[in-house]
Each structure stands twice: as C-alpha cells, then as structure tokens.
Image (spheres, grey):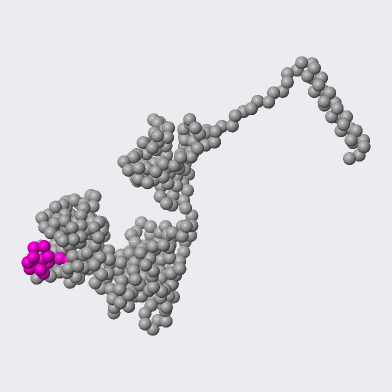
Amino acid sequence: MAKNDLNTTYGVAAIVIASVVAAACAGEPEIKVVDVPTPPAPVTAVHSLESGETLGDVFGAFGLFGQEMLDVVETIAEYENPRRFRPGTEITFTSRPEEGPLRISLRLDRDRTLHLLASQDGPRPWDARLDSVPVTRDTIVLAGLVDSNLYDAALSGDVDRLAPNELNDVVFRLSQIFAWQIDFWRDIRTDDAYRIIIAREVRPDGTVRSGNVLAAEFRNEDRELVAVRFQPDDEAPVEYYDEEGEALRGQFLLAPLDLARVTSGFNPRRFHPVLRRTRPHLGVDYGAPRGTPVRATGSGRVTRAGPWGGYGNAIEIRHANNLRTRYAHLSGIARGVRAGAQVEQAQVIGYVGATGLATGNHLHYEFLQNGRQVNPARMNFPRAEPVPEELRDEFAAAAEFALSRLRLLPMPGLGTGTTPRRTQD
C-alpha cells in the first residue's frame, strides 16, 4: 500500500472513532445486541400400527384431534384407503416439542411412501408427496432340467441374476401357466425340462417388485408345451396361448392345490383307514400342510359351505353343464365363501385341514357329473377361447419376439450341450 493511501486510511478510521465517542458523549442511545433463542430441533418418532389400532388412535396419541385429524385422513384418502392399513404399517411423525406434527410419513408398502407436510400458507392444510422406490427393468432367461421335482432342477441361463427365493416364484408361475396341461405331482418325470423368459422390475436392494412371464416351454416326457403371454390392452385380462393362438386355460384346473402330492387316488374299492373296511374312495386326496390355500378348480356358485358330516368343513360348487366339485376336511373357509356366492377359477376358497373323518392334514377333492362322482383325471374339458381373428397379427408379433429370445438358450437335456447347475438347498 502506498504511503499516501495508508495515511488516508488511518485518517478515515480516526474520524469514525471520534464520531462514535462524540455520539456517546452526546447521550445518544447505545446499540444493544439481543439474543434470539433458536427453536428446538424437530424430533422424529416412528410408530408401527398394532393389531386392533386405528389411524385415529395413532394420530390422537401424536396430538391431532378433530378437524386437524380429519384433514390428515382426507389427504391420505386421495392416495390410499385409510381402512386398508394393516398391522405393522410404519408411520413417522416429525414435530417440535409441545407442537403438532410438521411432517407425517406413511409407508404404504415396500415400494411407496406418502409424505404429508404441514402447509404454511397454502390453500390446504397439508401438502402431499408420494415417493416410489426406483426400479430397474430387465429380462432374464432360465432353463431347468428336472431331477425329482421342479425345485431340484439343474439350472442354466441367468442363474446368477436370480434374487433370493426368486426360484420359488419361477416354479410357482410355471405351475400356474401349465396348470391345465400338467399335474405337477403325478405327471413330472426325471429329465423333463423347461425354459422361461421373465420381464422384471428390480429394486435397488436386488429384490424383485414384479415380473411377467413373457413365454415358457415345457418338455413333459413326450410332450412339448409352449406358452406365450398376450394382453392386447391394459383393460384386457392376461392370457397364455400356444404358438397357434389356442388358449392354455381350460374350463377346470387339473388340481385344486399348487404342487401338492396325491396321497390317495380315485378308487372304487379302497380300504378306509378310519372306518377299517373297504369303502369306495370317490375322489382324490392331496397331502399338504395345514393352512395350505385351496383353489376352486372352476368358476361357479357355492351350494354349500360349512360342517358336513364325515367331510368335516367342506365346500361344494355348482358349475355349468351339470358339473359340481367338492372340497373336504378343510381347516377353514375363506372369507366371503358361503352358499349362494359366486367364485372364480383359481380363487382361494378354503384351507387344508383334518376335520371330519381324516387321519391327517389333506384335501379330499371330488368331481361330480350329473350327480355322480367321476374320476377328474379322465375328464376332457374344453379350453377357453383362442386369440380373436382380428388380433392374430398382433399376437404373432408378440410370440415371435418372446420365443426368439427364449430359444437363444438351449432346452437342457441329452445332446443339447448345456451344463446346468444344481440348485442349492
């Protein structure tokens, strides 16, 4: 700094100091510094909805009453029915001590969280924001070579990309898609094989939010079965068809349980284990743990649901063309299933048990035609409608796309050159 500049600076400083001193001496008020207390930091509390507890109970415990509570519930209702919240739902409250909530967050499910922010000057008391977990969309192709059952199959393809326990879902989906062509307990043979292509949505933690089977093939002994997913628009139901556009879905499922084992078949001269005498067994018994869901094999109207002598808790359904099905020894009957109710194919109607004349947990299933029990394994049921003619070109394009990608992975078996890996327990 130059000498003249330095002198100037010192001169200005001297004038300022002199002015302050003069003002003080003249009796002008002193400048006071006032400490403004900092508001307490917000506190966060997480509450899990308990059995029998309502949202009103929770909001009241956190200082919301009357119109304030009503405003919160009405805002939530724009995104989710408040009556649908189940025990375990997490609700997070953020507030300052002695004040009402500034923010409320509700975990609607593992993919969505609803945030409510107290509005300061907006037209509504609460502003809402719905956050969704981001997902990655991908496609995997798997093939399996069956040993004793589908769960023990040796796998090839995108095995390393499977999420934990996703294989169980793959097996379940196969059993659902081919439920009208394959009895997955009696029909499966060693060296049967399958391949399947699945379009998925994967969460950041590696778990799968959703998955759609685009196509599948199953080699069951000397049969080659093909399934292609087709949904012409969002309003139409999803159906699976073979390559020619014929529906896989039939009028009746082959079995009322998923992957259950047959413990006793249809036998007119069977020895009854409880009565200790020969007595016709006019149905099929499926062994399964207590509580296993039982599905209606066909759509129809319930004619009976409840205690029924030796059947224990049982359900009878009347179908078209003088057909009926019975489901016996149930531990319980699903909500809404009662005489006169309409049920749909594959709907859960009850749960496996051991009521009535039963020695252990199992389902007794009967099929009646014109009032007489018949062997369901010998029935030949019609399929659902094929792809409509006006949608044939659209279906052909979808089938070509899915099957061409699926068939890049060889079907495992002798002479295919594949090296499947055994699944781990």
**Along the viewing direction, whichever of 96 and 75 lies nearer the viewer:** 96
**Along the viewing direction, whichever of 415 and 337 lies nearer the viewer:** 415
**Along the viewing direction, whichever of 153 and 395 lies nearer the viewer:** 153
Q: Position of residue 43 (x, y in %)?
A: 50, 37
The quadrant of the rendering that contains the N terminus is top right
Q: State yes or no: residue 156 in magenta.
A: no
Residues in magenta, as a range: 270-284
Q: Is residue 158 visible?
A: yes
Which residue is situated farthest in the left direction here? 277
Q: Residue drawn 40% across and 76% down? A: 420
Q: Position of residue 343 (x, y in %)?
A: 23, 55
Q: Position of residue 414 (x, y in %)?
A: 37, 82
Q: State yes or no: residue 280 in magenta.
A: yes
Q: Position of residue 285 (x, y in %)?
A: 18, 65
Q: Residue drawn 27% across and 69% down? A: 184
User: In the shown orientation, is residue 131 left or right of residue 241?
Assistant: right
User: In the shown orientation, is residue 133 left or right of residue 314?
Assistant: right
The quadrant of the rendering that contains the C terminus is bottom left
